[in-house]
């Protein structure tokens, strides 16, 4: 008899939302006339059918209510409080181009519609753990960043991937805070980016990714603290030297380059042993690598001298 041991991110099929319910809701949303005051009406996705949910990537926890995940946001370009979702609607979502350059064979710009049409789109349910000790679970739509890198051909000298967020003063009032090192920069190693869990996100909850969550395209690595996710990306560069990232530039003693989730290593000002679940307010124990260790721990072999945690 075959005995199957579930992986860390898997849940029983009985706990997953029925496919018919997911796709039926999406179809209704796709038929809606618009997205509300101050926003730009967008097609749900470039494909004829919504991307299917990948059954391998299930978070093992209940999905966070869409209202909670889209109204409690960290995005300093729009302000330092969590209620920036209304202000973020001023960010134009089309046209939008992501430039991919640096140490690649074929540097070029990708229009967001081209990405939606040509990349291997799917839905993945991932956990997100904030360094502030709160968490959520979101059904993200997007594609592995490895697919984008394959399209441009990284050179052998490329060791890091640098992500740059848009800086549009007319739409982003937070940019007036001139003491911050704008634009927002994040980065990871090429090996981290090549890991299958590394995801470029273009949607959430069966809809285009809203601006307050980093639309139209953001980055997400679920084993890292959420500040490592570059939002509203306009440039992705492959480089040889490790970039100085936004929070590392502000306070390197609190926010390092690696920022892997570790409940045993406290932030200098608070514990990381547990997290508050967005929506329910329940506190639960935090897992090493946010529960994805069996898939990513090998990336950090022989890095004992590095401060791998935020």
Image (cartoon, rainbow, N blue to C red):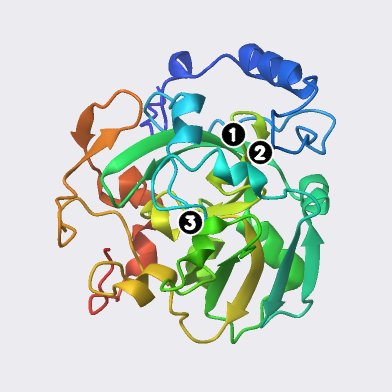
Q: Position of residue 211 (x, y in %)?
A: 61, 45
Label 1: few (<14), some or many (≥20) within 10 Å? few
Which percent across, then down, holds residue 135? Answer: 34, 39
Left/right of residue 42 with respect to residue 137 in the rendered view: right
Q: Residue at x 52, y 64 (%)?
A: 175
In-front residue for pair 116/255: 255
57 vs 214, nearest the viewer: 214
- Give the Cα separation between the discs numbered 3 and 1: 21 Å
Contact, CB < 8 Å: mark 3 with mark 1?
no
Q: Earlier in the sequence, mark 2 or mark 1?
A: 1
- What's the CA distance linking mark 2 and mark 1? 6 Å
3 or 2: mark nearer the eye: 3
Q: Is residue 225 above or below residue 58?
A: below
Kindly identify which numbered label has been placed on residue 122. Answer: 2
What is the quadrant of the C terminus in the image? bottom left
Callout 3–callout 2 Cβ contact below 8 Å = no
Q: Nearer the viewer, residue 130 or 40?
A: 40
Taking 221 as reference, is 212 left or right? right
The residue that mark 3 highlights is: 229
Q: Quadrant of residue 247?
A: bottom left
Task: Return the disc, 3 or 1, that comes first in the chain's sequence.
Answer: 1
CA gap, disc 3 and disc 2: 19 Å
CB atoms of marks 2 and 1 within 8 Å? yes
Identify the element where label 1 is drawn: loop
In this rendering, the answer to whether 306 lies above or below 288 is below
Query: Residue 156, position in %: x, y?
Result: 62, 84
* Disc 2 crowd, CA 10 A, few/some/many (<14, 14-19, 20+): some
Name above or below for residue 128 compared with residue 309: above
Q: Can you identify the residue that label 1 sits on?
A: 54
Comes first in the chain, label 3 or label 2: 2
Instruction: Tell me what residue is drawn at x 64 percent, y 69 percent.
Output: 236
Which numbered circle lies on residue 19? none
């Amino acid at each position: 008899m075959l005995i199957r041991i579930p992986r860390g991110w898997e849940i029983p099929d009985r706990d997953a939302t029925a496919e018919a319910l997911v796709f039926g809701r999406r179809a209704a949303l796709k038929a809606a006339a618009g997205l509300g005051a101050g926003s730009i009406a967008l097609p749900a996705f470039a494909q004829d059918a919504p991307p299917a949910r990948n059954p391998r990537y299930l978070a093992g926890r209940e999905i966070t209510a869409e209202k909670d995940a889209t109204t409690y946001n960290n995005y300093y370009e729009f302000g330092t409080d969590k209620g920036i979702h209304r202000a973020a609607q001023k960010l134009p979502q089309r046209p939008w181009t992501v430039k991919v350059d640096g140490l690649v064979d074929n540097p070029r710009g990708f229009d967001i519609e081209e990405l939606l049409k040509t990349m291997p789109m799917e839905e993945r349910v991932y956990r997100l753990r904030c360094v502030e000790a709160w968490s959520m679970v979101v059904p993200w739509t997007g594609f592995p960043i490895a697919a984008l890198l394959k399209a441009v051909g990284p050179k052998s000298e490329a060791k890091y991937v640098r992500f740059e967020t848009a800086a549009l003063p007319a739409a982003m009032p937070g940019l007036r805070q001139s003491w911050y090192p704008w634009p927002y920069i994040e980065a990871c190693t090429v090996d981290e980016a090549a890991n299958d869990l590394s995801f470029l996100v273009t949607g959430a909850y069966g809809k285009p990714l809203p601006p307050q969550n980093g639309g139209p395209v953001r980055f997400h690595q679920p084993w890292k603290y959420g500040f490592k996710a570059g939002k509203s990306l306009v440039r992705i560069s492959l480089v040889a030297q490790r970039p100085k990232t936004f929070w590392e530039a502000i306070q390197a003693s609190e926010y390092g380059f690696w920022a892997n989730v570790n409940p045993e290593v406290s932030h200098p000002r608070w514990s990381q042993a547990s997290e508050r679940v967005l929506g329910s307010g329940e506190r639960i124990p935090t897992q090493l690598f946010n529960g994805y260790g069996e898939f990513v721990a090998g990336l950090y072999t022989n890095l004992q001298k590095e401060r791998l945690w935020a």
